[in-house]
Image (tube, grey):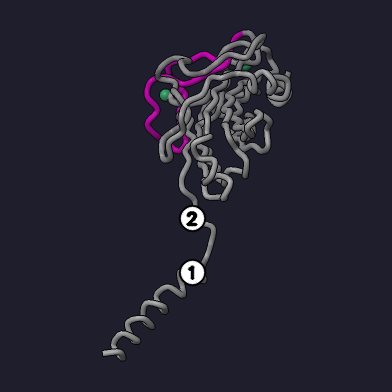
Amino acid sequence: MSPRLLLATLSLLLAMTTASVAAPLGVNLIVNGDAESGIAGWQPFSGVAALNTAAYAPPVFLYPDAPHGSQMFVGSVDGLAAGWQLVDLAGQAQAIDAGRVSFNLAAYLGGVGDQEDNPLLYVSFLDGAGVEIGHTELGPIFLDLRDNLTVLGGFRTEGTLPDGTRQLQFTLSMDAPDGDSTGAFADNLSFTLAAAAAVPEPQTWALLPLALAGLALSRRRGR
Ligand SMILES: [Ca+2]
Ligand SMILES: [Ca+2]
């Protein structure tokens, strides 16, 4: 089963869940995104193998190099492996619907040598009913992208949350044509929100200094 099919199949299940946490700006909303706490924070999909972690060992390296602790996420000997998390954004509804909440998704993704095992970090933007109204993703990262090296590469994307977003669903999945996805790697997963530049009102800001200057002038004249 492809990760995309998996996501589609299980979206209803996710909509029914009540697991959620608050979502402050400027902090990583992915729990245990660095894999240093095992697979804590990652919920399994029914009927799909759970994620696993493995210790870094040569010849694995990061490009560009970065702090990575001692553990990374890997797949499963049982093939496709995945885990998910849900974050509630109801508290930011007004700012989101005004187009004033931007996101930044980053991750190190890779795999082993000539294996086609491939990781995918997929973020669903869900509305109040749990329906996906948009998404962003990093991956899947195949061996051609890492030039057959045993490496995790740094990837990043950013954008603005679509109007109506009320929840985020993070899904990390590891697919493997060879039936063993332990050759897919992921680490340093991060998703942060920030206050986007306010919807441009250049006239307001351009006129304000002029208005103040005019006020000062009139007061001076009045003396
Ligand atoms: Ca780590
Ligand atoms: Ca494999």
Q: Which residue is drawn at 57% across and 16% down?
A: 75
Given contact means CB atoms under 8 Å apart, are the residues at marks 1 and 2 in contact?
no
Please identify the quadrant where the C terminus is shown: bottom left
Is residue 27 found inside the magenta-colored segment of the image? no
Callout 2 amino acid? Ala
Question: Which quadrant of the figure has residue 56?
Answer: top left
Question: Which quadrant of the figure has residue 11?
Answer: top right
Where's residue 162, x and y in %?
62, 44
Please identify the quadrant where the N terminus is shown: top right
Instruction: Confirm whether residue 148 shows in the render.
Output: no
Callout 1 amino acid? Thr
Numbered disc 1: secondary structure = helix
The number of discs equals 2
Is residue 73 found inside the magenta-colored segment of the image? yes
Comparing 82 with 76, the one in front is 82
Question: Which quadrant of the figure has residue 8?
Answer: top right
Q: Which residue is drawn at 45% across and 38% down?
A: 64
The residue at label 2 has a CB less than 8 Å from ligand 1: no
Which range of residues does the magenta coloring cover?
A: 51-77
**Within 10 Å of the Cα at label 2, are there few (<14), some (14-19), or many (20+) other Cα atoms?**
few
From the image, tell me which residue sits under label 1: 204
From the image, tell me which residue sits under label 2: 197
Where's residue 139, x and y in %?
62, 33
Q: Quarter for ligand 2?
A: top right
Where's residue 129, x and y in %?
66, 29
Q: Residue at x 59, y 32 (%)?
A: 123
Q: How far apart are marks 1 and 2 (CA)?
A: 15 Å
Numbered disc 2: secondary structure = loop
Q: Which of the numbered marks, if any, corresponds to residue 31?
A: none
Comparing 181 with 220, the one in front is 220
